[in-house]
Image (cartoon, grey):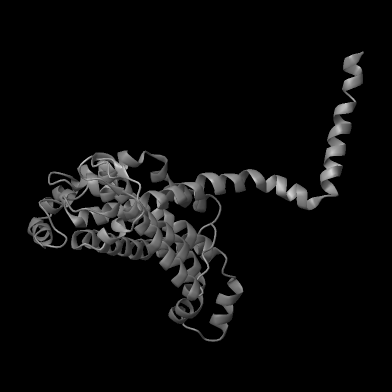
């Protein structure tokens, strides 16, 4: 009897609760937003604040313990020649990787958006996303084998009789090394391979949103395909390029695995942060160094906003 009495009350209570929230839409919205807002405030912003707080302390060189006296010594150390060299090298690498990813991704994204549909488009999506379904480390170490002196690329150059060309490229001081797997060029190649899917998808989404009526109007007005591309397609695709560049640029800035596995002893920001946080145990300086990518990305987003580039969501 108790069960029969309780069962009808459950729908009634749910109905009352839904009615109570219905007449109070702001409270309902606040209830829905409270958990993600709490996560954003405590976990995300809280960790960033803790990072900033750690960066103003110092590590005592004699005792190896943190000195909790507030100062800007770590930020001053960032402007030393060795540290500035790491920062400039990382920013240049991230810029080159972003430009290369955009150059490779744009034709693929354009073809996907304009000339594929149904199963063909699904096949392209699978081809773009397939590398992301495997382990990040597996892909990086696979490229280390491909770029090795006895790897596939070296074998292709030797088979074609153009091995001296590869040796000439590797002899260039700024990008070369003993082999592609121990050179900045190899690091660049792997960076582009790993991050290019993050550039293809936003550009494809931006191009897909371009109304065909604009392209038809350009053709009706006598516009050459090259003019249509320069004045219609490319400007409207810039938000997608901006969105993709945020991914590729920021991911390259903070990555430490690829430079550690592929390349020589050249250091990048991610490696310096890892070394000071892990092996050296200098967490305050690692925190100060890790703020560099945040500042660089903030500057980039500010410039993109002033140029009128609004990143699109895929």
Q: Position of residue 116 (x, y in %)?
A: 51, 58
In the picture, measured across the screen, residue 87 lies left or right of residue 163, that is: right
In the picture, measured across the screen, residue 8 lies left or right of residue 189, that is: right
In the picture, measured across the screen, residue 251 lies left or right of residue 87, that is: right
Q: Position of residue 188 (x, y in %)?
A: 26, 56
Is 153 situated above or below 279?
below
Q: Residue furthest top?
A: 1
| Residue at 10 percent of width and 61 percent of height | 165
Q: Residue furthest front?
A: 69
Camera-nearest residue between 12 and 240: 12
Is 304 situated above or below 134?
below
Is 138 situated above or below 270?
above
Q: Position of residue 90 (x, y in %)?
A: 28, 59
Q: Which quadrant holds residue 35?
A: top right
Quadrant in the picture for the N terminus: top right
In the picture, measured across the screen, residue 288 lies left or right of residue 109, that is: left
| Residue at 38 percent of width and 63 percent of height | 296
Q: Position of residue 166 (x, y in %)?
A: 12, 57
Camera-nearest residue between 122 and 260: 260
Q: How many marks?
A: 0
Q: Residue furthest bottom?
A: 222
């Amino acid at each position: 009897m108790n069960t029969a009495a309780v069962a009808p009350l459950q729908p009634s209570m749910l109905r009352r609760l839904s009615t109570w929230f219905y007449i109070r839409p702001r409270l309902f919205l606040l209830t829905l937003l409270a958990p993600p807002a709490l996560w954003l405030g405590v976990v995300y912003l809280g960790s960033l604040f803790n990072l900033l707080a750690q960066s103003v302390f110092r590590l005592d060189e004699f005792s190896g313990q943190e000195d909790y006296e507030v100062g800007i010594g770590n930020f001053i150390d960032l402007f030393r020649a060795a540290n500035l060299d790491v920062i400039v090298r990382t920013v240049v690498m991230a810029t080159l990787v972003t430009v290369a990813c955009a150059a490779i991704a744009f034709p693929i994204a354009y073809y996907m958006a304009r000339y594929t549909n149904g199963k063909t488009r699904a096949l392209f999506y699978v081809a773009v996303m397939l590398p992301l379904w495997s382990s990040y480390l597996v892909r990086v170490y696979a490229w280390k084998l491909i770029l090795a002196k006895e790897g596939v690329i070296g074998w292709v150059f030797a088979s074609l009789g153009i091995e001296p060309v590869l040796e000439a490229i590797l002899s260039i001081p700024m990008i070369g090394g003993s082999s592609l797997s121990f050179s900045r060029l190899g690091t660049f190649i792997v960076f582009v391979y790993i991050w290019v899917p993050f550039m293809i998808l936003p550009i494809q989404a931006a191009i897909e949103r371009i109304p065909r009526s604009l392209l038809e109007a350009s053709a009706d007005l006598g516009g050459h395909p090259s003019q249509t591309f320069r004045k219609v397609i490319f400007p409207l695709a810039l938000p997608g390029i901006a969105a993709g560049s945020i991914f590729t640029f920021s991911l390259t800035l903070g990555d430490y695995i690829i430079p550690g596995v592929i390349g020589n002893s050249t250091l990048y920001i991610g490696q310096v942060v890892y070394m000071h946080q892990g092996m050296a145990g200098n967490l305050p300086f690692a925190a100060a160094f890790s703020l560099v990518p945040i500042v660089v990305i903030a500057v980039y987003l500010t410039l993109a906003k002033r140029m009128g580039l609004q990143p699109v969501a895929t």
